[in-house]
Image (tube, rainbow, N blue to C red):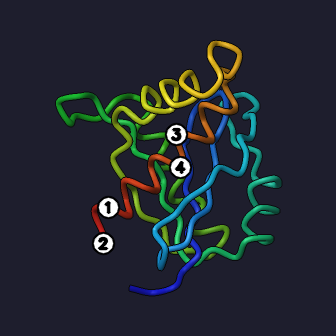
Amino acid sequence: MENRTIIAFDFGTLSVGIAIGQEITETAHPLTAIKTKNDKPNWLEIGKIIQEWQPKLAIVGLPLNMDGTEQPISNQARKFANRLQVVFDIQVKLHDERLTTIEARAHLFNIGGYRALNKSKIDSISSVFILESWFLQHA
């Protein structure tokens, strides 16, 4: 196992949740959620985060239906992943993100009740769950 810094993204049309993790320890923590504008990610802000953390790999959550088929937003997540790879010259992998938003909501509710359930926290915690799930499958 390498000691790579890995960044994870929970792509959405309203915001993009971002988490960072270390492959050697298989730990992840939330960074932020960046609002989109007209369904477009804020590439300048994403670039600043990539510059600051210098990840060697990016994991992008791929939204799938419960039966494993793709949703309309799946194609947008693929385009987001492709652009990450081209613009920032970083290796990108897609990872099944089924149920991560539900897990994030439950986690936040358990620690803070309804007041903890805001969109940016949900998206950033979802990106943590995406990365932790990727670690589990690649240990």
Query: Which of pointers 3 and 1 lies earlier in the amino acid sequence?
Result: 3
Residue linked to disc 4: 128
Q: Does residue 53 appear to the left or right of 101 in the view shown?
A: right
Amino acid residing under circle 1 = Leu
- Kindly identify the residue that appears in the image at 81 percent across and 53 percent down: 45
Residue linked to disc 1: 136
Circle 4 SS class:
helix
Distance from label 1 to label 4 (Cα)? 12 Å
Circle 1 SS class:
helix
Distance from label 2 to label 4 (Cα)? 16 Å
Disc 4 + disc 3, Cβ < 8 Å: yes
Percent position of residue 58, x then y: 53, 65
Residue linked to disc 2: 139
Percent position of residue 50, x then y: 72, 67
- Kindly identify the residue that appears in the image at 66 percent across and 31 percent down: 39
Q: In which quarter of the image is residue 71?
A: top left
- Kindly identify the residue that appears in the image at 77 percent across and 45 percent down: 42
Query: Which of pointers 1 and 4 lies earlier in the amino acid sequence?
Result: 4
Disc 1 + disc 2, Cβ < 8 Å: yes
Distance from label 1 to label 2 (Cα)? 6 Å
Disc 3 + disc 1, Cβ < 8 Å: no
The answer to which of 108 and 102 lies nearer the viewer is: 108
Distance from label 3 to label 1 (Cα)? 15 Å
Query: Which of pointers 2 and 4 lies earlier in the amino acid sequence?
Result: 4
Residue linked to disc 3: 126
The answer to which of 26 and 70 lies nearer the viewer is: 26
Amino acid residing under circle 3 = Ser
Query: Which of pointers 2 and 3 lies earlier in the amino acid sequence?
Result: 3
Distance from label 4 to label 3 (Cα)? 5 Å
